[in-house]
Amino acid sequence: MYLLGYDIGSSSVKVCLIEASSGKIIASDFSPKKEMKITAVNPGWAEQNPADWWLNLKLAHEAVMHESGINAEDIKGIGITWQMHGLILVDKDQNLLRPSIIWCDSRAVPYGEKAFKEIGEEKCLSHLLNSPGNFTASKLAWVKENEPEIFEKIDKIMLPGDYIAMRLSGEIGMTIEGLSEGIFWDFKNNRISEDVINYYGIPKSFFPEIIPTFGIQSTVSATAAKELGLKEGTPISYRAGDQPNNALSLNVFNPGEIASTAGTSGVVYGVLDQLEYDKLSRVNTFAHVNYTPEQTRLGVLLCINGTGILNSWLKHNFATSLSSYGDMNDLASLSPIGSKGLSIIPFGNGAERVLENKDTSCSMHGINFNIHSKGDILRAAQEGIVFSYEYGMDIMRNIGMDIQVIRAGNANMFLSSIFRQTLSSVSNAVIELYDTDGAVGAARAAGMGIGFYADSKEAFSSLEKIAVIEPEHEKRDQYLEAYSRWMRHLNEIV
């Protein structure tokens, strides 16, 4: 018996097949092999064609099925996770009306800021737990004002995972978690926010049926079964945005537990059991995967847009003579803690929520042509990314998060010993690394959705811890001195 996980990222689509009883990965693949194109017609814009997600899902799915050699009839559940906050619009025939405005697109910032003031800051925070900000609802408001001919044709709005589920089943649904990440959910009244939709002029008919995060949400249609080589009627039994799902992948379900990722963007995500929020909406609070109106489980999300993308940019534009990220890490390791006084502010991927939606761009401070080398710049970039995490984690601590242990997958920036040791030492938290990823987590969660696993404890019983990183207490002053210098430069900018 097998379970499938689909992870719809902005860089690639990953597909993973696991054996349900053991949790063992049977096969996995991703597509495209180079990063998916993000179109930016204007500064601050970011769009992708959802049809490209589907095409790449099919390619990765085909590779997984070929590698595994299993019978499609033995796949008993499908889980889906996706890049959060994207906006997908379809007409009454389920045709796409425009490309998706994705998570790092900042054009809707003025719409969210205006709504925050005019609906009322206290009302937004106490009911939505966030400012409308640059989220899905505000992106839809942008479409309404700037593309009225498209707005008039809308039958349903979706998030990226809902679109994939629609292509699989022909049915459209949305979870409370999804509604909350779009800033459509009123936590005090446990319903779609009347304040938001009335303010923006969004018809309630745009919203599909609300479905549970875990459970038989829909089944694979005859059309999709033929297209993918699946069995018609296979249950789609779980869906969640990538950060709640990444927390799930690391078995983070309960209050006080913390998860982190460090891909294109960087995230620290912690679980709360109270309706808490940051008054400046610099970190955001959404429904966690196990949230219900009866059980408060909220994910406090710190997102830094400009993280791994900085390392990627350096690889492709600066460290071109180095063949891999491992080579970059080796060169960076020759530089001491603090990078000889060099600081890099990594915020070069659009407006940053943690900076109250300011777009500061990336900047380098303190470079000395006589002492600094390529390795110093590479180390300063990784330290700057870590320092942006610590800056945000201080905000999380102020709303009740106790950050003592950070769980992360052994991937992306966490493969770098500089990155993880700096993060552990600056935050004074232990880091636990696990052999998992979002697609694996979605597959395990699909097993919970069909009832194969009794609970999360059983679903994640085979999760393998592969490393533990402790703070370097004897060197912590050096890390904190570098962080303090970085903070001075950031304060000069903002």
Image (tube, grey):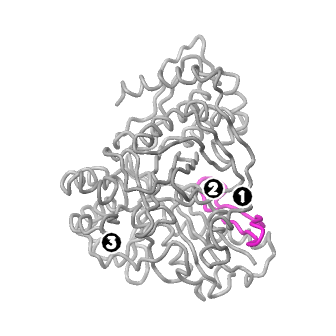
Sequence-first tag of 2 and 1: 2
As drawn, the residue found furthest toward the top would be 370
Residue drawn where x is 32% and y is 65% of the image:
186
- For disc 3, the marked residue is 191
Q: Which amino acid does label 2 sit on?
A: Leu
C-alpha distance separating marks 3 and 1: 35 Å
Measured as percent of width and height from the top left, residue 164 is found at 53, 72
**How busy is the neighbourhood of tag 2: few (under 14 within 10 Å), some, or many (20 plus)?**
many
Q: Cβ–Cβ below 8 Å for labels 3 and 1?
A: no
- 9 or 303, nearer to the observer: 303
- For disc 1, the marked residue is 463
Task: Name the secondary structure under disc 1.
Answer: loop
- 66 or 402, nearer to the observer: 402
Q: Which amino acid does label 1 sit on?
A: Leu
Task: Name the secondary structure under disc 2.
Answer: loop
Sequence-first tag of 3 and 1: 3
Position of residue 423 in the picture relative to residue 148 (left or right): right
**How busy is the neighbourhood of tag 1: few (under 14 within 10 Å), some, or many (20 plus)?**
some
Measured as percent of width and height from the top left, residue 171 is found at 48, 82
Residue drawn where x is 48% and y is 72% of the image:
162
Residue drawn where x is 50% and y is 78% of the image:
166
- 258 or 111, nearer to the observer: 258
The quadrant in which the C terminus is found is top left
Measured as percent of width and height from the top left, residue 242 is found at 54, 59
Q: Which amino acid does label 3 sit on?
A: Arg
C-alpha distance separating marks 2 and 1: 8 Å
Considering only vertical position in the picture, is 265 above or below 220? above
Measured as percent of width and height from the top left, residue 325 is found at 69, 39
- The span shown in magenta is 12-35
Checking the image for residue 335, the label placed there is none
- For disc 2, the marked residue is 250
